[in-house]
Amino acid sequence: MALPPEYQTEEHRIFRESFRRFVAAEVTPHVDEWEAACAAPRSLWLKMGEQGFLCPWIPEEYGGLGLGFEYSVIINEELIRGDGFGVGVPLHSDVAAPYLAAYGTPEAKAAWLPDCVTGRVVTAVGFTEPEAGSDLAAIRTTAVRDGDHYILNGQKTFITNGYFADVIVTAVKTDPAAGHKGVSLILVHKDDPGFSRGAKLRKMGYHMQDTAELFFTDCRVPAWRLLGEENRGFRYLMEKLQQERLEVSIKCQVMAEECFKEGIEYAKTRRVFGKAVGEHQANAFRLAEMATEIELGRTFLDSVIVSHLRGENVVQKVSMAKLWLGEMVNRMAYQALQLHGGYGYMEEYRICRLTRDVRALSIFAGTSEIMKRIISGNLGLRSG
Ligand SMILES: Cc1cc2nc3c(=O)[nH]c(=O)nc-3n(C[C@H](O)[C@H](O)[C@H](O)COP(=O)(O)OP(=O)(O)OC[C@H]3O[C@@H](n4cnc5c(N)ncnc54)[C@H](O)[C@@H]3O)c2cc1C
């Protein structure tokens, strides 16, 4: 299934073309440099902002273009096709900033939404802690009300855009005894007293994505930064995690398509025992299986995107997509690298970085095991 015609109009085509040209000029040539620096520079964000490629869904009253999620899909896809696998823009545009738009006070929205569009404000989500990743109800960071402020104490880890983010959607406990019913979300600004960050974390892949630890030590945050109501944060997470998981599912599918492309191109050109690698039946069949999985993945993903665009409840389907595509992309990377032989292990070949980077996809935004927990729960099965 492809997206229906209303999501593939002439405007969508022009937007895609123009963003593809942008990526070819402003992203692809700098990938090695950003991988070495473990970050994409702020100048990229500002350039993207200037051209309307950040948070294109933000309403016009806040300086955005008021476009649908399908434009975010285009940006996510084209960034990957142009090798910007780890650019943290989809996390900013489609995961973090939506919390501000949906639950922020008018003061918070006026302060930051316009600059989420220009790139002067980069956002992140700070949920994971050293002792709580899958089990977010177990977070220990606390926020205690003190007059017009909250005082935060605790720590976050593995935070994407964490090193450069200006505003962080932070999960805290406002009622530590109440489990998931004591979770709230609050916006922390990088200049808040008591906020600090650790060094950029060294990772297996996604090198160009800055990932950091965050620390809150008697960190004073004005009370108007609370998102929605106190102790309702878990509910907001459950709502917004669906789009985050869809955003990651899109990454899985497009990166799988890129792995396949690398695999088949190489298999058609490299010759072994007098014929192309792909002409040996074992490899031809391997590629046939890969092509089938890619096709199945695309069809399912597009159906989930359409459901999401139509405002349907996608919890079950998006959990299935994140689960299956997160595992499928890892199979594709493994098989495509195998087709390359030793060359696939060399940095010079694109499949090398793809293989490294896709490994995180079955882990972040909820692991495969957590997706199975949600899916089986929705089937009426309560597992531990
Ligand atoms: C590159 C990268 C970027 C990230 N970016 C962010 C970010 O921007 N913001 C943020 O908040 N977090 C971020 N994360 C954190 C990520 O969401 C967590 O790593 C993930 O949710 C898993 O949590 P954990 O690492 O604590 O693993 P754990 O929760 O400790 O899980 C360990 C293992 O146990 C399994 N497991 C857990 N519970 C169950 C269960 N009930 N049944 C069966 N198995 C179970 C898991 O699947 C996993 O295999 C990022 C992580 C990475 C690697």
Image (cartoon, rainbow, N blue to C red):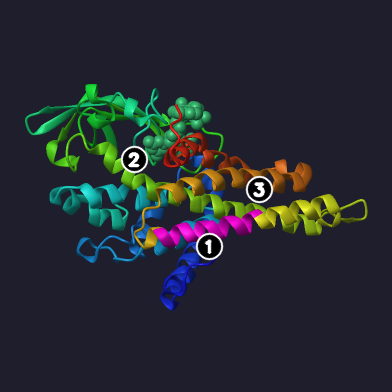
Q: Is residue 321 above or below residue 210?
A: below
x and y, in percent, of residue 214 in the image:
34, 30
Q: Is residue 121 visible?
A: no
> Label 2 crowding class (10 Å Cα cut-off): few <14, some 14-19, many 20+?
many
> Do tag 3 and tag 2 residues touch (Cβ < 8 Å)?
no
- Give the residue type at disc 1: Ala
Cα distance, mark 3 to mark 1? 25 Å
- Between disc 3 and disc 2, whose residue precedes? 2
x and y, in percent, of residue 16 in the image:
47, 68
> Label 3 crowding class (10 Å Cα cut-off): few <14, some 14-19, many 20+?
many
The answer to whether residue 361 is left or right of residue 230 is: right
Cα distance, mark 1 to mark 2? 28 Å
Residue under label 2: 125
In the structure shown, which secondary structural element does the residue marked by tag 2 occupy? strand
Q: Nearer the viewer, residue 211 or 336?
A: 336
The answer to whether residue 368 is left or right of residue 258 is: left
Magenta extent? 293-307
Residue 288 belongs to magenta span: no
